[in-house]
């Protein structure tokens, strides 16, 4: 099997990010490749398909677990490592050199290097929060690359970290908890354990919490337990959602909630639990979503498949974009690969 065919069959996109200019989408996978799509191609008035994607390999030893974009840098979270690479918007190219990198410290009792699983970027304070496989959320100053603080409390690896500009941070993990943090306090301000709610527990799927999202007053989370909305002040569960699979994605999107995961659909719900949209996807599991409302509505949902699923009105699937097999100059590379295979054949008997 050719390398491209292998990657097409087993492509797994865990991370996406939108550039500061809101003109480009970046998608990174576990093969170490970063794909770039011009969003202007999706907003054309014609029916022509978008131009081919660009791909920037980071190396087969780089598992791209999470992405963030700050100023003109794409920030990559991999195994034990966070690094920044410069994006040249005029040329539409990513630098081949890492401008900076930060190594996640190994814990004394660690047996393996921790994954960097999730980013929350607070642009107002130039601060990056990284949720990692050692159960720690690291607060990093992007001005000097220094780890300013370690948020410790999870007893297993962190799946997701999100936050609010007022300094509130929320992290969810394999230990079945959502930790509430303040940048002004050392200990968690509160701990949520959804699996202890009988309405949410799904025993066959465990207690882990794969995704969390917040707005001013509400928190939504899910994983093994059913996804549900919680009031941030009272800590009461006010609504559950009947999403039928394990949850890896949940987001507040305007006045709706997006939920996705190990199911052949992603779903939009109202805040009171009414199903608004049931959108089919080709992913074995959906792991990543990014969206914007300006300068135009756009959402991309990615996961374990070779396609980006594109939504423009957040209620219907607008298009699907292939990744491998839809890359600039890819055919030339495949032709060269075929030639190399032919030259390597042994015609002797």
Image (cartoon, helix red, strand yellow):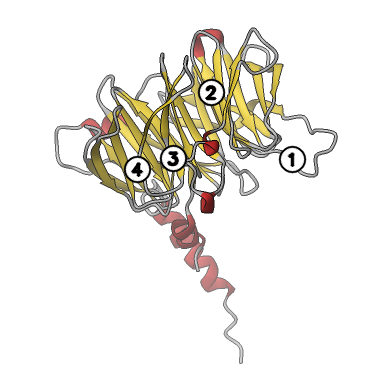
- For residue 86, side relative to residue 143 (left or right): left
First in sequence: mark 4 vs mark 2: 2
Residue at the left extreme of this rendering: 46
Residue positioned most to the right: 108
Above/below status of 176 relative to 9: above
Gap in Å between the C-alphas at discs 4 and 1?
36 Å
Of residues 344 and 327, which is closer to you in this image? 327
Instruction: Report the Cα–Cα distance between label 4 and label 2.
Output: 27 Å
Q: Is residue 320 left or right of residue 172?
A: left
Spatial CA span between label 3 and label 2 = 29 Å
Residue named by callout 3: 199
Can you tell which quarter of the image residue 207 is in?
Answer: top right
Q: Position of residue 269 (x, y in %)?
A: 29, 34
Closer to viewer: mark 3 or mark 2: 3
Crowd band around label 3 with a 10 angstrom C-alpha radius: few (<14), some (14–19), many (20+): few
Element on which disc 1 rests:
loop
Give whichever of discs 3 and 2 has the lower sequence position.
Answer: 2
User: Mark 1 — residue?
Assistant: 113
Cα separation, mark 4 vs mark 3, equals 11 Å
Q: Which residue in the protein does label 2 denote?
A: 120
**Residue 242: mark:** 4
């Amino acid at each position: 099997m050719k390398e491209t065919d292998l990657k097409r069959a087993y492509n797994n996109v865990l991370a996406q990010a939108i550039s500061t200019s809101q003109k480009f989408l970046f998608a990174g996978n576990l093969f170490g490749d970063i794909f770039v799509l011009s969003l202007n191609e999706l907003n054309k008035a014609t029916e022509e398909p978008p131009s081919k994607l660009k791909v920037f390999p980071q190396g087969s030893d780089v598992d791209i677990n999470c992405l963030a974009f700050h100023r003109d840098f794409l920030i990559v979270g991999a195994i034990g490592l966070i690094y920044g690479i410069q994006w040249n918007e005029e040329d539409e190219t990513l630098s081949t050199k890492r401008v900076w990198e930060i190594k996640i410290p190994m814990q004394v009792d660690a047996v393996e290097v921790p994954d960097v699983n999730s980013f929350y970027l607070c642009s107002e304070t130039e601060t990056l929060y990284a949720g990692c496989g050692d159960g720690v959320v690291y607060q990093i100053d992007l001005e000097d690359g220094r780890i300013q603080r370690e948020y410790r409390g999870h007893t297993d690896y962190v799946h997701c970290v999100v936050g609010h500009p007022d300094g509130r941070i929320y992290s969810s993990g394999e230990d079945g908890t959502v930790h509430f943090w303040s940048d002004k306090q050392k200990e968690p301000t509160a701990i949520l354990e959804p699996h202890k709610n009988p309405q949410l527990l799904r025993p066959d799927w465990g207690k882990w919490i794969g995704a969390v999202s917040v707005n001013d007053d509400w928190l939504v989370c899910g994983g093994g337990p059913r996804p549900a909305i919680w009031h941030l002040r009272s800590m009461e569960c006010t609504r559950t959602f009947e999403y039928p699979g394990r949850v890896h994605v949940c987001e507040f999107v305007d006045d709706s909630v997006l939920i996705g995961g190990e199911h052949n659909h992603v779903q939009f719900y109202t805040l009171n639990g009414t199903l608004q949209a049931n959108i089919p996807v080709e992913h074995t599991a959906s792991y990543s979503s990014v969206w914007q409302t300006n300068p135009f509505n756009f959402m991309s949902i990615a996961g374990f498949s070779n396609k980006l699923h594109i939504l423009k009105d957040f209620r219907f699937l607008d298009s699907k974009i292939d990744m491998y097999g839809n890359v600039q100059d890819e055919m030339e590379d495949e032709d060269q690969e075929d030639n190399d295979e032919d030259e390597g054949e042994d015609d002797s008997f």
